[in-house]
Amino acid sequence: MDLAQGPHSLQALQARYGERHRWLLLLSVMLGSMAAVMSSTILNVAIPDMSTHFTLGQSRVQWVTSGFMVAMTVSMLTTPWLLSRYGYRRVYEVCMWLLLGGGVVGGLANDFPLVMAARVAEGLAAGVVQPIPAIIILRAFASEEQGRASGLFGMGVVLAPAIGPSIGGVLVDVFGWRSIFFMVVPLAMVALWLSRRYVPTSAPGGVQADADSPGLDWIGLALASASTLMLLNGLVQLRSDDATVALVLLAMAGLGMVVFVAWQRHLLKPRRRVRTASSGRKAKSLRQARQVRRGPLMNLQVFGHRQFAMGALVSFTYGIALFGSTYLLPVYMQMGLDLSPSYIGAALLPAGILLAVTIAAVGRLSHRMPPAHWVSWGLGLLALSFALMPLVHPAAGLALLWILVILGRIGLGFILPSLNLGALRGLPKDLIPQASSVIGFVRMLGGAAGVSICAIVLEWRLAVYALTASHPGRADLRAFNETFVFLATMTALALLASWKMAEPVASPAKD
């Protein structure tokens, strides 16, 4: 055993636990990811109570969710830099402490700004944590085991948002909105305990974390943050009467993205060495070089690989469809079908559990088809479930609705364990951390935009039918149906990209 990196390095832990270590490591990061996912989804059930408690309008209290989403989306891009500089364990434990502290502070806070600060801290931690499991699966597991590992991980992570809202609804009714914040605390504490045993101090690849590695690209991070914030605010402003502000924000977001890409390309260019005449000038030059040296926040070289480029496009459009439908389905069931919130929560729970089971099954069967094929089948089922929603009508009963919801969840179960594998498999190992954070970023960006886009389409169609229809109930249903058709179209576009994600057929090896 090489002890040069200490008793908690990757090599030392592999020697201590043997073949079991990669599964124990996956379990450790899975619990942390469950805590991150639960903190991102479960608070939605507490927003009405929080709005009443703090006497805030719905639009302002909604920033409890939006602030979390923006922080999580942008912080994903920092994961590769943090892991290479500080190693898995330190980064993971700091994130768990942030989630734990955010849960406690948010649950005890009496001021809304403090609640917002707790949510932003949780969002930053959740964003950094989410790319880590994909990095571990692709580095620690052989290709024939990666599907099984992704299935096991996906099943655990999906159970959190499937069960969480049902438990959260009961907690809000019995103990109030503060209890929602504390739900993440037990998971974070167990994850911290497991990290002390199984998460290595090493950086990806088993190398020692390097505190003298290139500094963080703060300019790129600021550009990405500002562009993301303006994009999401611009989409929200589209729902207001004054579209001028929305168009200005969206234009600035587009300009910010262009500048961000140009800056990342600039940082990828090789730098010339500067020769100095004296040792004093040389030492000063070295200090300046260490201060100026920056690695790109987003390594654009990953887009030079067709599988990854297509996978990123799938991830973005899939994020729109997934998060958009997560917003649309409960609203449709309440406003369009006049179902109670408690009935909706109880009815969606079996579909969430079925999703987790499907993910585990697909993980075990993943070796029978390339990941891109599983993704394509899943997107096809998801698009079909959206496209058939206009056939649902209260007068005909709700059996078709639950069949379509289950069909969509089975489609998601095909996609979730396969998308990262299909996009990242075949990349050079040194690009995997960057690629994992980038694909997570574009998925969350699509998801954050998808909620606003679905709301815009729905409000537009509701306004149209409110003016022309004599039966408001029927008008509502038609507006929802057309929004589902929009989601089916977005999913079909992702399906076109998934066909291009398939691995190229390798030519026979020559002796």
Image (cartoon, rainbow, N blue to C red):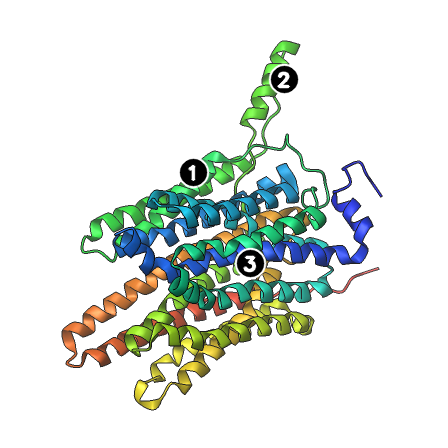
Identity, as a three-letter code, of the amino acid under mark 1: Ala
Label 2 packing within 10 angstroms: few (<14), some (14-19), many (20+): few
Residue 377 lies, in percent from the top left, at 54, 75
Say whether disc 3 or disc 1 marks the residue closer to the N-terminus: 3
From this viewpoint, is residue 49 visible?
yes
Residue 430 lies, in percent from the top left, at 66, 46
Q: Quadrant of the C terminus?
A: bottom right
The residue most toward the bottom is 396
Identify the residue shown where x is 44% and y is 57%: 180
Mark number, residue 34: 3
Q: Which residue is mark 1?
A: 222
Left or right of 386 in this view: 506: right
Q: Quadrant of residue 473?
A: bottom left
Give the Cα separation between the discs numbered 3 and 1: 28 Å
The residue most toward the front is 174
- Position of 219 relative to 109 (above/below): above
Q: Which residue is mark 2?
A: 275
Which of these two is toward me, 107 or 478?
107
Identity, as a three-letter code, of the amino acid under mark 3: Met
Badge 2 vs badge 1, beta-carbon distance below 8 Å: no
Left or right of 332 in this view: 362: right
Identify the residue shown where x is 61% and y is 57%: 30
From the image, state whether disc 2 or disc 1 is nearer to you: 1
Say whether disc 2 or disc 1 marks the residue closer to the N-terminus: 1
- Position of 362 relative to 174 (above/below): below
Give the Cα separation between the discs numbered 3 and 2: 51 Å
Mark number, residue 166: none
Badge 3 vs badge 2, beta-carbon distance below 8 Å: no
Residue 15 lies, in percent from the top left, at 82, 49
Identity, as a three-letter code, of the amino acid under mark 2: Arg
